[in-house]
């Protein structure tokens, strides 16, 4: 069992023992902003990985800033952001965006790979601050609109459902209605990015990836690389996840950019799982 899974199990036990108030107090104590780790991908010009800490030392979560160009005149060049991290790391994320050259007005689109709060926590803020639109799959929109990470999942721990907004700092101000819903096969040409949306359920029913023309796949939490490339340790529907992997094998994928951990070669992942 990985340390990450042990930590999550401990967290559930603590929730039951301490109750919502105790967890809320712990969240306040541990929610200090920490610097983001910002990495420009040398083999993929125009992609910047912004790695943000998760609460309770549960690891890190990635946001990806992608330089866009060649859009319509009214859109122009700018950036597309894939995922937004937890609300508690907002200052670090904004500093990283500005440091990468993305200023208010430059961010054209925020694509959310799924509705979990460690990926959607800053979407509403960035829409207001940078003037970006928010896109996600309708299957996960209830998470963002109602602040309920289990709104579309098959099973839900009642305690975790109650406290998860407190754990990840997803309050009423963080809730939002997306500006557009994207489906499998939709392209992002209108935002200056040669890429398409790929529906990849498993972690959640509304999980999506962003596949660029160069073969970069921003896969959200279908896969992770916290120890080695693997399925994410939390799956709502394992059968759907396996079907998503089979689907990806028919697409021109080269590099996987996961929600957690470092990028890795798709071909190597497929070889290792045989």
Image: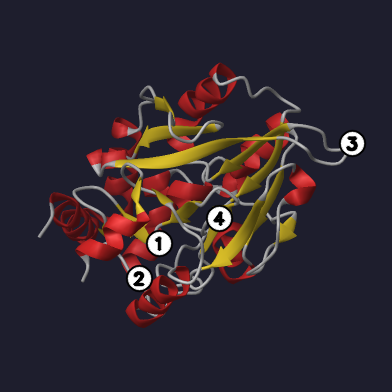
* Residue 13 seen in the current view: yes
Q: Earlier in the sequence, mark 4 or mark 3?
A: 3
| Mark 1 crowd level (few <14, some 14–19, many ≥20, 10 Å Cα) | some
Residue 266, position in %: x, y?
36, 56
Callout 3: SS: loop
Q: What residue does disc 4 label?
A: 211
Q: What residue does disc 2 label?
A: 158
Determine the residue positioned at 35% across, 32% down: 31
Determine the residue positioned at 53% across, 49% down: 120
Residue 175, position in %: x, y?
61, 51
How far apart in space, not on screen, are marks 1 and 2 (Cα)? 6 Å
Q: What residue does disc 3 label?
A: 73
Which colour assignment does the render follow? secondary structure
* Residue 258 seen in the current view: no
Q: What residue does disc 1 label?
A: 162
Image depth: mark 4 or mark 2 in front: 4
| Mark 2 crowd level (few <14, some 14–19, many ≥20, 10 Å Cα) | few
How far apart in space, not on screen, are marks 3 and 2 (Cα)? 49 Å
Circles 4 and 3: CB distance less than 8 Å? no
């Amino acid at each position: 069992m990985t340390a990450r899974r042990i930590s999550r199990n401990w967290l559930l036990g603590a929730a039951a023992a301490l109750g919502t108030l105790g967890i809320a107090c712990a969240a306040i104590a541990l929610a200090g902003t920490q610097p983001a780790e910002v990495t420009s991908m040398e083999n993929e010009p125009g992609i910047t990985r912004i790695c943000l800490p998760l609460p309770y030392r549960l690891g890190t979560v990635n946001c990806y800033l992608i330089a866009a160009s060649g859009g319509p005149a009214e859109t122009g060049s700018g950036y597309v952001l894939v995922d937004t991290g937890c609300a508690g790391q907002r200052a670090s994320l904004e500093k990283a965006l500005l440091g990468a050259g993305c200023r208010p007005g430059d961010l054209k689109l925020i694509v959310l790979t799924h509705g979990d709060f460690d990926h959607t926590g800053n979407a509403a803020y960035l829409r207001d601050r940078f003037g970006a639109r928010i896109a996600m799959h309708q299957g996960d929109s209830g998470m963002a609109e109602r602040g309920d990470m289990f709104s579309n999942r098959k099973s839900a721990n009642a305690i975790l459902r109650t406290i998860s907004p407190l754990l990840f700092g997803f309050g009423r101000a963080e809730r939002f209605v997306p500006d557009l819903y994207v489906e499998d096969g939709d392209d992002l040409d209108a935002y200056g990015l040669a890429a398409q949306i790929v529906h990849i359920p498993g972690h959640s029913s509304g999980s999506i990836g962003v596949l660029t023309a160069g073969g970069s796949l921003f896969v959200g939490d279908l896969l992770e690389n916290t120890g080695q490339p693997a399925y994410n340790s939390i799956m709502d529907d394992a059968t759907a996840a396996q079907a998503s992997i089979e689907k990806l094998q028919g697409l021109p994928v080269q590099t996987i950019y996961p929600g957690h951990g470092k990028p890795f070669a798709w071909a190597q992942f497929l070889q290792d799982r045989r």
